[in-house]
Amino acid sequence: MTKLSVNVNKIATLRNSRGGNVPNLLKVAGDIQDFGGQGITIHPRPDERHIRYQDAYDLKPIVHTEYNIEGNPIPKFVDLVLAVKPTQVTLVPDAIDAITSNAGWDTKKNESFLYEVISEFKRNDIRTSIFVDPVIDMIEGAVKTGADRIELYTEEFALEYGKGNKEAITPYAQCAQLAIDLGLGVNAGHDLSLDNIQFFKENIPGLLEVSIGHALISESIYLGLENVIQMYLHRLK
Ligand SMILES: CC(=O)[C@@H](O)[C@H](O)COP(=O)(O)O
Ligand SMILES: NCC(=O)COP(=O)(O)O
């Protein structure tokens, strides 16, 4: 079974745009789990433009499914994760000013750095995953970092699949199989959506978890809009 972990960054983006508490991030996280979501993912960025560091603490008692915190392991992030103790930490090499995650780790160049931070998280019983491009060398390098899992960075797949290029799945399927053969668990995320998720799932062996935010929240708006318009019209009669 593949678990669905819902990334709630976009809920925090909307909340922060007005400075109040609407939408209420904690309520949304609770509702997602009540509706069957099997995990909550957050990706606090250093500028706290969506998830604030305080949110990571506030969500801890709310998340009774899998709690996944993603981010670049700068000291402030490492301290946060060690204090919150989520189920899983996913390490992402995003630059401070990146608009969103845009690359996986070079697991060969960063092997000793990753090995050290991963060891610290593992000593604290936090499962570790590292964000990687679907490149065989990077999967081989990932094993040496001691990570429990990889998260395949799926933006390229999503882009190509959207253009009709189903062959784009091939490097992902090969890397997933290699990861399994080498003893790594396989997660995936970035730009997965209702359009591409079934094809991705059907073609990736041993897919343990997907984390989905941007598309899922957008789809929730599209699919909820008609209902809400009708509710307003009813009140305006
Ligand atoms: C790690 C990853 O793939 C990202 O998709 C991510 O967590 C989303 O971050 P933003 O919501 O800041 O774009
Ligand atoms: N790890 C990927 C994630 O959490 C969500 O990515 P996206 O669906 O917002 O692109």
Image: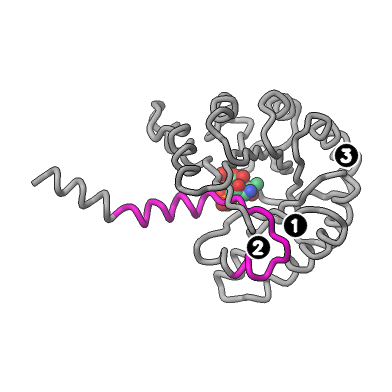
- Residue underneath mark 1: 133
Residue 149 vertical position relative to residue 173 in the rendered view, above or below: above
Give the residue furthest to the left: 237
Q: For the residue carrying disc 3, how many other residues have a C-alpha within 10 Å: few (<14), some (14-19), or many (20+)?
A: some
Q: Which quarter of the figure has residue 48?
A: top right
Amino acid of disc 2: Glu
Q: Residue at x 82, y 59 (%)?
A: 179
Amino acid of disc 3: Tyr
Residue 156 image label: 2
Point out the stretch of residues depicted in magenta.
199-225
Mark 2 and mark 1 in contact (Cβ < 8 Å)? Answer: yes
Q: Tag 2 or tag 1, which sits nearer the N-term?
A: 1
- Residue underneath mark 3: 115
Residue 198 vertical position relative to residue 229 in the rendered view, above or below: below
Amino acid of disc 1: Asp
Give percent across and percent down for residue 139. Answer: 83, 56
Residue 100 shows up from this direction: no
Q: Residue at x 87, y 44 (%)?
A: 146
Q: Tag 3 or tag 2, which sits nearer the N-term?
A: 3
Q: CA distance from mark 2 to mark 3?
A: 27 Å
Residue 132 vertical position relative to residue 26 in the rendered view, above or below: below
Q: Main secondary structure of the magenta part?
A: helix
Q: Residue at x 48, y 35 (%)?
A: 12
